[in-house]
Amino acid sequence: MFMWATTSGGDVAVTVSWNRPFEQQRRAAEVRFAVPDDEIVVRIERGRTLERNMCTDLIDGESEPEWVRTATAGRGHLVVGEFDPVTWRARATLTLEGVEGSDGLRFAPAELSTDQIGFFSG
């Protein structure tokens, strides 16, 4: 599972990934976690037009991150809904608070929500 958000200028992004075991991926789940976490990885990226670098089928070398670090502090709450076998998707909501990077960059509290959580290989 992968979720992301960028600043309006696209110069900073936060990404969250959770590699659940395959047999659990289609089940609904709710987890609260502290950053850093062994299973849920929060990363901070810096670069240009980073919104074009996320979940795209076209490689865009101009939007590659110039700097990527694992977040060093914060907490999160992730709710993933039940898998829909027709659309191969699920709804997810992620709340992040107190996320901080190793360079001292701090993020305002954020809530991300999508019904585009996919379960595709590759």
Image: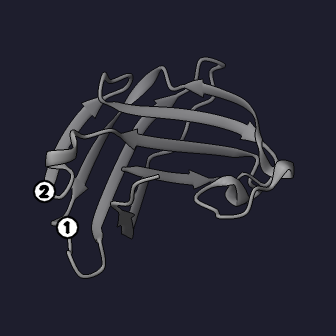
Quadrant in the picture for residue 97: top left
Q: Which residue is mark 2?
A: 27
Query: At x 29% / y 29%, what residue is drawn?
Result: 39
The x, y position of residue 94, in whole percent, is 34, 53
Task: Please provide percent x and percent y for residue 87.
Answer: 30, 79
- Of labels 2 and 1, earlier in sequence is 2
Q: Amino acid type of disc 1? A: Phe
Q: Which residue is at a point 36% across and 63% down the rendered structure image?
A: 117
Q: Which mark is residue 83?
A: 1
Q: Which residue in the rendered view is the most extreme toward the front?
A: 122
Q: Are marks 2 and 1 in contact (CB under 8 Å)?
A: yes
The type of residue carrying mark 2 is Arg
Task: Classify 54 as above or below 36.
Answer: below
Q: Secondary structure at mark 1?
A: loop
Q: Residue 12 location in percent, x, y? A: 69, 43
Quarter of image, res 5: bottom right
